[in-house]
Image (cartoon, coloured by chain):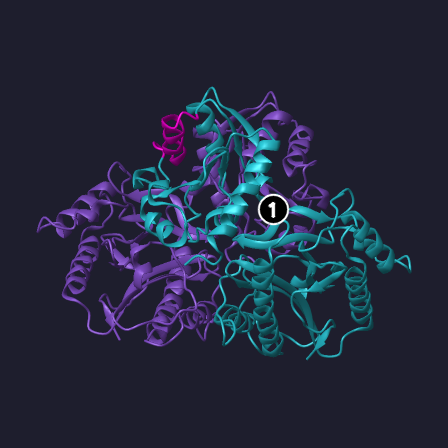
Chain colours: A cyan, B purple
């Protein structure tokens, strides 16, 4: 069930060890499900219980630790040898007495790694505060270091095969967005449009199916279009309402997100004007992104383009783009590089971003985004879909 | 957009303060999205960035803190007054410099609560290790206490309206499970069956729509049926394969989960025998559950029923049932009470559980579950669906 050659996984492990080395980390505990998948192939909806990889700087492969009932899933989906797959007993699950980290520290002690410098992903959903305090209690002689970005930064530049998967996800999101736009109309329940979108996301294309995206469709309608992250209700769409859709296709856990906006009726001039500015802004981004440019510079050029008339003060209020790709709920973002003031990362080929320079007004907004890949001399979009306000 | 009377939310706040009081907690930081929703109504796919409620023991309502762009969502979905909804600027988002907890501690200082005993949800997905270390760094004179279960334990006993929502979720899961069973057949792609299930989950019923469940459909097929938490692929279902489906209906974020098993072809005797035992076991559970009984006692009686022949040693290897209801990804479980050895919780009316006493063999398994509600004198299932092995 591996979706990359074992060689590609091993290369990722080698690169990770390089980063560990530079940061003085001897043992890395990897709890981010996307990072676990990236290094070993592990895939399963088991991240709602504690699980992790242990990577030692001088060991060839990581050790997978998870709930006993997920051991078979790890055997089926990873390239790890069986002795490196270890399951804890079920009385560790959501218990007030035993904690899964106690199982982990027992293994670290047994291996003689209890006094090492241990990297932990400090600001990652599934590494809770309790995980840290249990590790500190059980391993008083270890030194803990924040390693939130160690594996995530290795993920920043994609391989050709990763890019292929993201483009395949692009074919899926094109179909899902079309299903959404086709479904939205006055008198249709929001939930029925959302159901059609999810159907398209998962059935995928005739050639290949879709995986579950890390985020369910964001659907902002009517008054809700002034918010950023609401979902659907069972209310009906109404005339003279704007609806913003943000959704992704997902293939082998690689995402291609996309945002578009639909209006039912005759769109007001103000909305048309905002739409035009946002589209111009996105096209500016596509125009300027190329290897060698610094992330914050892209944002500056975009800002210059969209604020030329002095208006759109709100254009400043969130990041222009973020690195994305492989992901698990609740996010497809990689939490590393952003196109925003202060981010000095230099663009390189095969970095991938979601550029979503939407503009919200107090009462409604217009959203339009592109998933982009930095190429050898510029950039390309991972999905192809018209960039405009859709009117029903 | 509130789905309960304000009075019901306020009663929940009062009960939470009662628990804070008993545990000596003066200020409670509530990061679990289900707990945030439970107390204020807040609903949005924004839990992928840091957000929380501050509840002070002598204040009437909580303070909502989240990302600036989600402030409108909080205004639309909660009963809180506007001055109690506070957004942090976007340069706090996934930044290496500013952390959202620094914004939170500034508010705590301003309020004069920097030296208080502060409860934090230590073992909850969205309260990362970094959240704790930032709080400790900014508030050196505060005392931090683990409050993971403070609000979650208030949620244990449902109101009549919550039960209604869960039963409505039950209608949805009945349709979604039927869609799954109808779709599965030799030659059909797994992703197409999953797409039909998701469509049914979200479109809901003709009378009301469905919300996104906290977990995408679990679909264990063929060799994968020996694992516990895999999802679909785009492979086709094959003859003589078993498929286990675990999925939920969701209504206003309240879940009704259900697990059933389908076999394509002539099921082997061994599978039929396991199926019979599992069904007998579930019926035993439905038979014995009633107010006053201790949780672990239910598990003991179930174990006695299924192991009568001395076999099914594996029947012991995971918890029989867990409390569930309101939830956000990645889980619909409440992470409080379990029916397993050691849990001495006494059953009370309107507690709700997912009882999932499945049996896995090395090569495949049979899963069947019921969502149950403890009634005045026994229990009832929240969904009605035949309890048997489905054969195609």
Indicate the position of residue A165 as horizontal and vertical percent values.
56, 62
Q: Residue at x 42, y 53 (%)?
A: A45
Residue A100 drawn in magenta: yes
Q: Residue furthest front?
A: A7
Residue tagged 1: B49
Residue B86 drawn in magenta: no
Indicate the position of residue A68 as horizontal and vertical percent values.
32, 44
Residue A99, placed above or below residue B298: above
Q: Residue at x 58, y 63 (%)?
A: A164
Quarter of the rendering containing residue B109: top right
On the rendered image, what quadrant is the C terminus of chain A found in? bottom right
Residue B311, placed above or below residue B146: below
Quarter of the rendering containing residue A109: top left
Left or right: B61 in relation to A369: left
Visible residue check, residue B14 = yes
Visible residue check, residue B59 = no
Indicate the position of residue B15 as horizontal and vertical percent values.
45, 40
Indicate the position of residue A317 as horizontal and vertical percent values.
76, 50
Graded by Cα atoms within 10 Å as few (under 14), some (14 to 19) or many (20 or more), the crowding at tag 1 reads some
On the rendered image, what quadrant is the N terminus of chain A found in? bottom left
For the image, the number of numbered tags is 1
Tell me where the magenta segment starts and ends, as one range: A96-113
Report the magenta stretch's main SS.
Answer: helix
């Amino acid at each position: 069930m591996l979706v990359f050659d074992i060689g590609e996984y091993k290369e990722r492990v080698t690169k990770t060890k390089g980063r560990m080395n530079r940061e003085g980390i001897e043992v890395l505990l990897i709890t981010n499900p996307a990072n676990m998948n990236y290094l070993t192939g592990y895939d399963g909806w088991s991240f709602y219980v504690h699980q992790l990889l242990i990577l030692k700087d001088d060991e060839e492969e990581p050790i997978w630790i998870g709930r006993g009932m997920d051991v078979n899933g790890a055997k089926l989906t990873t390239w790890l040898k069986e002795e490196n797959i270890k399951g804890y007993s079920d009385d560790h699950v959501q218990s007030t007495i035993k904690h899964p980290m106690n199982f982990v520290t027992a293994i670290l002690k047994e291996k003689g790694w209890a006094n090492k410098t241990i990297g932990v992903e400090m600001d990652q959903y599934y590494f809770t505060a309790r995980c840290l305090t249990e590790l500190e209690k059980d391993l008083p002689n270890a030194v803990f270091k924040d390693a939130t970005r160690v594996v995530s930064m290795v993920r920043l530049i994609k391989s050709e095969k990763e890019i292929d998967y993201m483009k395949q996800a692009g074919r899926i999101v094109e179909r899902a967005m079309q299903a959404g736009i086709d479904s939205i109309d006055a008198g249709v329940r929001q939930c029925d449009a959302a159901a059609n979108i999810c159907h398209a996301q998962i059935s995928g294309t005739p050639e290949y199916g879709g995986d579950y995206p890390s985020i369910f469709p964001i659907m902002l309608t009517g008054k809700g279009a002034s918010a950023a992250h609401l979902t659907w209700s069972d209310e009906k769409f109404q005339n003279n309402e704007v609806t913003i859709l943000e959704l992704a296709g997902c293939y082998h856990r690689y995402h291609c997100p996309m945002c578009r906006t639909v209006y039912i009726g005759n769109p007001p001039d103000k909305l048309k004007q905002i739409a035009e500015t946002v589209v111009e802004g996105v096209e500016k981004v596509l125009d300027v992104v190329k290897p060698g440019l610094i992330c914050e510079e892209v944002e500056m050029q975009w800002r210059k383009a969209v604020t030329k008339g002095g208006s759109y003060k709100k254009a400043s209020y969130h990041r222009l783009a973020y690195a994305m790709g492989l992901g698990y709920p609740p996010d497809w973002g990689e939490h590393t590089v952003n196109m925003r003031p202060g981010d000095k990362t230099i663009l390189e080929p095969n970095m991938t971003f979601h550029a979503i320079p939407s503009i919200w007004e107090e009462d409604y907004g217009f959203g339009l985004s592109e998933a982009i890949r930095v190429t050898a001399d510029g950039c390309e979009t991972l999905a192809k879909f018209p960039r405009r306000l859709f009117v029903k």
